[in-house]
Amino acid sequence: MRREIVLGIIIIVVLVAAGVSYWWFTRPVKPTIAFTIYYNTGNVQRERIASLLASEWGKLGFKVTVQGLEWPVLLDKILNPEEFDVYIIGWAPDYIDPDNYAHPMAYGGTRFKTLNIFETTDPADISANLKSAWLFDTPEYAVVVGEKGTGATVTVPAGKKILIVQYEVDPEATLPLNESVPWVTINPGMYRNATGDALILAGVKVTNPAWREAIYNAVQQFTNQMLPLLWLGQAIMIHGQWTWVQGWYYHPVMPVRYNLLWEDAAAPDVEIGTLGGGVAGTPSVSYENNESVISIATFGWPESFDPAASYETFGWEIFWETGDPLVTYWKSTTEYLEKDLAIAWAYTPNGTDYYFVIRGGVKAYNRWVDIIKNDPDFGGETSEVYNITALDVLFSIWRIAELQLDPSWMILEYIDVNASNTLTEEEFNSLLEQGLLVTDYHGQSYTPKNLTDLLEFFHSEGLSTAGVIHIKLYEPYPAILPILADGFVIVVPMKYVWDAAGWNYTKALIDIDYGKNPEGFAKWILGEEGENETSHRLLHRYPVATGPFYVYDYVENQWIILKKNPYYWNQTLYENTNYGKIKYVIYEIHSEAEPRIAMYEKGASDFCAVPLERIEDVNGTKLDNYQILIRKDPNLLTYDIVFIVWNTYKFPFNITLVRKALAYATPYETIYKEIYNEILVPLYGVIPKGMPGWTDYNIIHYEYNLDKARELIEASGIFKSKVVVSVLPPLLLALPIFTYLDEDDEE
């Protein structure tokens, strides 16, 4: 009897334990999804954003960690899609065109066998030309994108013109995702979508302004809906200055030109300090900030004084003050390009060949004559002044491509420098007389009959000329003129380089056939030498000037003095205006904020790089009848943007619903107000407001909404519980029964 009772108890215990065990080992298990948000150490804003997102995104069930990395280490990591999950970064434009945003940040690397763009009024053309279709309803057009074929059906909004983008993917030419490199062959988030890629390449292919606007409207909608990256915000302009400075203006890409500013004569004279004895060996003298001086307290140092090498803001500002490109923007204007060293231009109707008539009488000033002569690295006899011609423009562009330094991609990508060349005015006139070229200026298109007619169209009649440069493009690129307005393409005199190096200039002219064979430059300019190449070493140290100022002297990481250029070609600009009154521009370099602010508050600097957290302390500082005025204008937008890169090559960022959930779980207003001190405004797609192609039409306005985010996560199914079944534990629990029975049998 005792045996049966004990056995019954054991069986009951085993059954209960087995039930508990079965529940435990077969219960639904919610998967753990973990990832890391990276930021570059020292960037306080990005560090705070990373911590904030880790907290907020963690509320959706993710396990999020944060890690700061030194900038070089982070750069290595983000170029390897196996190495990163999420990071925070920003973008400032190289030139004014939406392709400078869409291509680097949204193009997925898809190659196409065919890509056709055409307008129609008949919706039946959609079904007749596309196998599948994605319709983007833009302000003026219904942009319909799809694979080549037949049978696609979409509903076109009433009254809309139809723009069809038809594509056929070339899988053999498309680099596989696992071989793609972020920022190089694909966008930084590794996102690929044939529809989006077709749109982005269509924007590059077409030149029709109305079509381009509609296509980039569609690109904006696509990047808003699919979120290849998370768009955080667009920066507004913060401008601070002493109120004695007059004439300041803002351009979203180009720095202000200081010869267009002036100062009140009654402004106080404040000592800057004793400067001199730099590379130029100028005498040490005490400089004052007065009505003839623009003084700037800043940090950093130009990467190089060689325009072919520098790819950062400070360097490009120096180029903008001291040099001239072919075309430019006048002050705040962004819509139309203006004449600069080119006084007229024309191009072939297919957009592959551009011709620029070069302004005569432009001189490059070389203030280094004695210094170069006594420099053992050079030692050549240089001239104080060099006349600029079309040959110098050809040399400058060719040299950028040959050196292949940081900014060179903008030349290498679009311009066939060895197929470019110079023409005489007579040769160019012959092309015009054949009716082979067209042009446009200030929005007006025209077919010039001859060179005289072309110059009149550009209001350049009566101006002297210095030859014509022909720039050959690999294929049409609508943004080629904005690229040629950048600071890195300022013109360098070829003969200056040859003289300084002691090379035979006459022999070089023969080698290049006087501009007909630019490949001949390669006998002298050796790109494989990199930063040791002769022309780079010369211009890195001894820059020349065609612009309103020249580099007078400098001491690296301490100060730069620019001085008014006595040979500046545009001196008539100063007649009967306040322009041209600034004689010196002085940059005082301080890596720490406090010395900069001290100079600023005492009036020794007109402008100053003030950290965001110190703006309220500095703003309103008074001296005599003047004050420091720092203003944030939400209507004065830069083209600088901040965004989150998430790796769509990895789970869970490869799921659109997850990306949208994270977008709704991002506390934008906290980021704008508490982290960026209200200098960011919302950004909902790849194109910033103010840039051609931007639209708010049919755009989702993501805002912080955790409930919405959780709904999207639930719909994505990524946290769906999984059941793991095991029969081993119940068997193990049954062992006591078998053991008891065995023991009883032995008894």
Image (tube, rainbow, N blue to C red):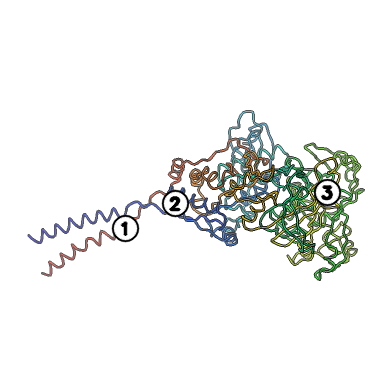
Tell me: residue 50, above or below residue 369. above
Q: Which mark is residue 622?
A: none
Q: Earlier in the sequence, mark 1 or mark 2?
A: 2
Where is residue 566? Give x, y as percent: 85, 52
Where residue 715 sits, quadrant-wise, is: top left
Disc 2 marks a residue whose amino acid type is: Phe
Instruction: Out of 259 and 605, give the one closest to the viewer.
Output: 605
User: Horizontally, is 174 left or right of 522 in the view?
Assistant: left
Name the residue at 21% across, 55% down. 15
Q: Secondary structure at mark 3?
A: loop
> Is residue 687 visible to the viewer in this orientation of the structure?
no
Q: Nearer the viewer, residue 191 or 361?
A: 361
Q: In 3D space, how far apart are the residues under numbered discs 1 and 2 (Cα atoms)?
A: 27 Å
Q: Which image quadrant is residue 522 in? A: bottom right
Identity, as a three-letter code, of the amino acid under mark 1: Ser
- The reply to whether the C-beta atoms of the residues labelled 3 and 1 are less than 8 Å apart is no
Instruction: Determine which residue is flagged by label 2.
Output: 62
Q: Quick one: SS at disc 1?
A: loop
Q: Earlier in the sequence, mark 3 or mark 1?
A: 3
Q: Residues within 10 Å of mark 1 (few under 14, many from 20)?
A: few
- Depth order, front residue of 195/445: 445
Q: Are marks 2 and 3 in contact (CB under 8 Å)?
A: no
Q: Which residue is mark 3?
A: 341
* Residue 149 x, y percent position in the rendering: 62, 41
- Which SS class for mark 2? loop
Quadrant that contains the N terminus:
bottom left
Badge 3 amino acid: Leu
Where residue 726 is drawn, which disc sits there?
1
- Nearer to us: label 3 or label 1: 3
